[in-house]
Image (cartoon, rainbow, N blue to C red):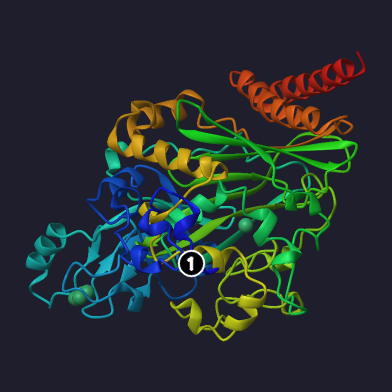
Amino acid sequence: MTTHDTTAQSAAPIEKKLQPFGGYYTNKVSGHDPELTETGAGTPLGEYMRRFWHPVCMSIELTDTPRFLMIMGEELVAFRDGSGQIGLLHAHCVHRGASLEYGKIQTRGISCCYHGMVFDVDGTCLRVPFPQGEEEEGERYRCSIRQGAYKAFELHGLVFAYMGPPDQEPPFPEWEGNFTVENGDELVPYSNFEHCNWLQVQDNSADNYHTMALHAKQQVTGEHFQGTTFDEVGAASMEVPPDMHFVPVQGGRGLAGSGARRSDTDHMFIRVQHQVLPNLSLHAYTSEDGKKKKHFSRFHMIRWTVPVDDTNSKMLGWRVMGPGIDTRGVGDKGMVGYEAIDFLEGQVAMRRPERFGHYTLDDIPPIPADHRARDNYKDCQYAPGDYEAMVSQRPIAIHALENPTKFDAGLYMFRKLLRDAVRGSNPQAGPEQFAQWLRDCGSQPNSYCSGNVFDLPVGRTTQEEVTLRRFLAKQVVAIISESESLRGQARTDFVKSKMALLQQDVLEKRHA
Ligand code: FES
Ligand SMILES: [Fe+2]
């Protein structure tokens, strides 16, 4: 028998696709899952998504010229008219199709460059330039047309829009009233483009398994390190894979993912992420070193993954900045904005060294849709980040080819929640009941998102330590669930007192 002969190792025949050098048996690529990835008008997911408010661009993108946008496959223009109203209109003029991106912003509305028709932000045609003596006919024509329009508004530097049927408009949810911004903290907007389907970007939010590889220094080739890993920002505990506990919450409208990991011999760090259907994720402090007790620290990043079309998407959201959340003072506001974020390296296609700050609308170079065509391609190979991992999963990741581990449970659960919502098999997450739930809580739902550090010495045995991690991951979510009927400070006080009791309880049992 030669060393290459594997046939004698087992009596049972090896499944073809598991044969050594058997790539031939897995070289046929199946199709993507349209139900969870396609969001064009009229698709099941596209219809579901159009029942929610989404950010579509940053306020700074609204300048003295209209901004062309593609959202869920629809060509749109956004602008702020002279009276301060935000317009989001179908790009192609209802007259004969010229794009309103070449139009002129008016005191009220926008005029089309081709024949000068003027449209208000709600799509009303305000003016049709008919010749003298034919005003009456012009007026009849004016009243017979309407430009496609969507309701939009600005909040903390982002432009939000509702692209569904007007009579089904849901309330805009302000999570916990003001997104838990504490005194002195602020919501700093950003927008990062991803050249891939929206779902793999959303999947990444529930993928706690990747941080210990992708964001660790060990993943960087040689001395070519270009930027920041968790190790570099002193949050090395994030490089330890956590024990994860995922639970659908709030009637299956979202998913809480609680990860327990040891930050040092005296501290256990429990980080809870909250994902909300269809495309929101709320993230706890990303620079936590886990060295000091901390209970129920709140949002550090609030972001939506917005489909541009089926093979492009963008993350739009806010980084919460200031001493309330950023207890270690490592945030860098100068690095948060358009195509930039102060969070690790490799979040954006055209990463740039910190010393240059972030791009503005005017100086960002064209981003090639092919990630291998970037000037910085080799640098990105030396030190890849989330952008590289996500866009290289193919333009639309193919779920049928995946071989998930138990650590992928969170994103698989989120996909199931989404599928159930789209199919109507979980009516609570359907558009109507979702909107009613928001109205019932005054449009200020509670979030599970939190960072928690417990003063707890390491277990005396591996088994004790593992049991403790799993117990705490569950208990933290259970405490937050118990607080669901409370609001504001009363809820915070309740959660913090319960967490203090939990810590005390665990310590007493340890010493018993
Ligand atoms: S195409 Fe717009 S006014 Fe004619
Ligand atoms: Fe990541």
**Circle 1 SS class:** helix
In the image shown, does 114 or 303 lie closer to the viewer? 303
In the image shown, does 445 or 44 lie closer to the viewer? 44
The quarter of the displayed image where residue 108 is located: bottom left
Which residue is at the far right? 511
Which residue is at the far front? 1
Q: Which residue is mark 1?
A: 391
Q: Residue at the spot x=67%, y=58% of the render?
A: 213
Q: Is residue 44 above or below residue 25?
A: above
Q: Is residue 439 above or below residue 152?
A: above
Query: Quarter holding the C terminus?
Result: top right
In screen coordinates, is 85 left or right of 113?
Answer: right
Q: Position of residue 169 (x, y in %)?
A: 35, 39
Q: Residue at the spot x=28%, y=79% of the render?
A: 113
**Ligand 2 sits in quadrant:** bottom right
In the image shown, does 309 or 291 lie closer to the viewer? 291
In screen coordinates, is 234 left or right of 164?
Answer: right
Which residue is at the far top? 512
Q: Position of residue 146 (x, y in %)?
A: 20, 58
In screen coordinates, is 471 left or right of 387?
Answer: right
In the image shown, does 321 or 44 lie closer to the viewer? 44
Residue 179 shows in the view = yes
Q: Residue at the spot x=78%, y=51% of the render?
A: 322
In screen coordinates, is 206 left or right of 42?
Answer: right
Q: Position of residue 48 (x, y in %)?
A: 32, 43
Residue 80 shows in the view = no
Q: Position of residue 315 (x, y in %)?
A: 52, 58
The amino acid pointed to by label 1 is Val
